[in-house]
Amino acid sequence: MMELRHIAYPRQTVLITSEAEVTLMGKKVEKKNIMTMSWSMPVSFEPWMYAIAVNDECLSLELIRKSKVFCVNFMPIELKNNVLYCGRNSGRTKDKFKETGLKEEECEKIHCPRIKKALAYLECEVAEEIKAGDHFVFIGNVVNAKIKKEGNRVFHKGGDKFTTTID
C-alpha cells in the first residue's frame, strides 16, 4: 500500500508547546514540552478553532489533557534542524527547550510556553478531544493569535526532508 506521505505531503510542520504537572520517574514535576507535528489544521472560522492530532504515546498527550491548553508555533525553515530534533526525541527524557536552544516566552492568554523565534502562534484552549485510531485529535478554541514576522515556514516531505514556500 502506498505510504500516506506520498499522497498527503508535503505538509506544514509546526511545533506544539504544552505544560502541566506530571509524574516522571516517581516525582511530580511541572513539565514543559515541544512536539513536532505535521497533522494540524484550522477547522472553524466562527468561532476560530484549530485541530492537532497527537500520537497516543506522546508526553504532550498527557500535558494537554491535564492543562486543557496548547500553543501552535509556526516555525521558519531556518530552524528545520530544531524541528527535526523535537520530533525525534522524547520529552520524557529530554528538555527540548534546553537541548535545542529554543527560547520560550509565556503565552498571553493561557498557561503555556510558546517559542520566541516562531513566525506566528495560536494559543488554544481544548474544546473537544476525539479518538482517531492511534492518535487523539484536540480541537482548540483559538484565544490569542499573532503573526510576529513574515518568513518561509517549514514543510515536511518525509524522513529528514523538508521544503518551504517561496515568496
Image: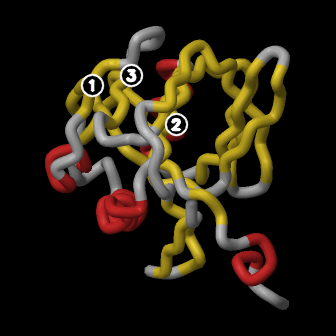
Q: Is residue 42 left or right of residue 65?
A: right
**Residue appearing at x 42%, y 37% in the figure:** 149
Where disc 3 sits, the SS reads loop
Cα–Cα gap, marks 2 and 1: 13 Å
Residue tagged by mark 2? Answer: 72
User: Circles 2 and 3: CB distance less than 8 Å?
Assistant: no
Q: Residues within 10 Å of mark 2 (few under 14, many from 20)?
A: many
Q: Is residue 64 visible?
A: no
Q: Position of residue 57 (x, y in %)?
A: 52, 53
Looking at the picture, does residue 149 appear above or below residue 11?
A: above
Q: Specify the amino acid type for callout 1.
A: Glu
Residue at the limit of the structure toward the bottom, as seen here? 1
Rendered residue at 59%/76% (across/down): 157
Q: Secondary structure at mark 2?
A: strand
Q: Which residue is mark 3?
A: 112
**Where 80 falls versus 145 (above or below)?**
below
Q: Position of residue 14 (x, y in %)?
A: 51, 50
Image quarter in which the C terminus is found: bottom right
Q: Nearer the viewer, residue 117 or 130?
A: 117
Q: Which mark is residue 134?
A: none
Q: Is residue 146 visible?
A: yes
Q: CA distance from mark 3 to mark 1?
A: 9 Å
